[in-house]
């Protein structure tokens, strides 16, 4: 068996946008005299607000309607401010470069929108690495449904069993495993506290191990 492709998640894995969302939302809740429990917010990480909607939850806690448009705009403003200080997570670009040098096909599967994902990839100069990008715009259901990964590997022209998914969230890992890919989790500062159902390998950072070592380790334990 060989590995022919790597497929990356985006939010929280390539750039840690996820902890920034939690920080922004937690601040909003605090300003309203409420608390957003991390374990509740974790339900929608790597998925969508269909699973858990923090704005609906805020209304439930306050027991009164909120100005949804204003609250969302404020959350986005706070998130943008936090993201000005964020950059690509350690080891990510080295993995992309290594994959390219090894002749591996490179894909991306994200529950976010295409404009969101490609905007950040362009900002950090990473867009050119990806041969196939699949986002919420392409599927009926996002993660933990496997469709994003199935579409990504199909777009790359490889079998799921010959591809490695890199994920940071339980919902993302569920999607990758259900699609039949090898799954390597690299949790961020927030998702490191979450419980994962299944995966093939766990790392704290892509800077801890070279991509060639990861591939070798996965193939050795198949």
Image (cartoon, rainbow, N blue to C red):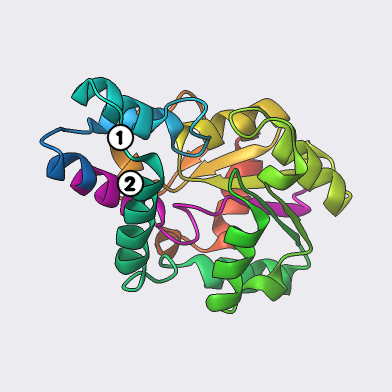
Residues at marks 1 and 2 touching, judged by CB atoms closer than 8 Å: yes
* Above or below, comparing residue 53 to residue 83 in the picture: above
> Which quarter shows the C terminus?
top right
Residue for badge 2 = 71
- Which image quarter: residue 76? bottom left
* Above or below, comparing residue 171 to residue 159 in the picture: above
Q: Position of residue 43 (x, y in %)?
A: 41, 28
* Above or below, comparing residue 96 to residue 164 in the picture: below
Whether residue 188 is visible here, answered yes or no, is: no
Q: Is residue 12 magenta?
A: yes
The one nearer the camera, 118 or 209, is 118
| Label placed on residue 66 | 1
What residue is shown at x 64% (from left), y 61% (from top)?
115
Q: Secondary structure at mark 1?
A: loop
What residue is shown at x 33% (from left), y 46% (from top)?
71
What residue is shown at x 59% (from left), y 29% (from top)?
144
The one nearer the camera, 119 or 173, is 119
Residues rendered magenta in the picture: 1-27
CA distance for labels 1 and 2: 8 Å
Q: Is residue 194 magenta?
A: no
- 179 horizontally vs 199: left or right: right
């Amino acid at each position: 068996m060989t590995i022919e492709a790597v497929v990356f998640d985006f939010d929280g894995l390539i750039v840690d946008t996820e902890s920034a969302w939690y920080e922004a939302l937690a601040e909003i809740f605090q300003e309203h005299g409420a608390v957003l429990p991390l374990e509740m917010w974790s339900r929608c990480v790597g998925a969508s607000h269909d699973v858990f909607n923090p704005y609906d939850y805020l209304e439930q806690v306050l027991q009164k309607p909120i100005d949804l448009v204003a609250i969302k705009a404020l959350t986005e403003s706070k998130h943008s401010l936090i993201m000005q200080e964020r950059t690509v997570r350690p080891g990510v670009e080295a993995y992309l470069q290594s994959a390219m040098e090894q002749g591996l096909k490179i894909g991306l599967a994200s529950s976010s929108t295409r404009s969101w994902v490609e905007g950040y990839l362009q900002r950090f100069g990473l867009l050119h690495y990806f041969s196939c990008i699949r986002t919420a715009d392409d599927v009926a259901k996002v993660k933990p449904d496997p469709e994003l990964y199935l579409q990504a590997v199909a777009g790359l022209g490889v079998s799921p069993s010959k591809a490695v998914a890199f994920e940071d969230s339980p919902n993302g890992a569920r999607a990758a495993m259900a699609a039949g890919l090898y799954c390597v989790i690299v949790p961020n500062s927030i998702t490191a506290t979450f419980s994962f159902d299944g995966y093939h390998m766990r790392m704290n950072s892509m800077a801890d191990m070279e991509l060639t070592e990861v591939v070798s380790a996965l193939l050795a334990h198949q």
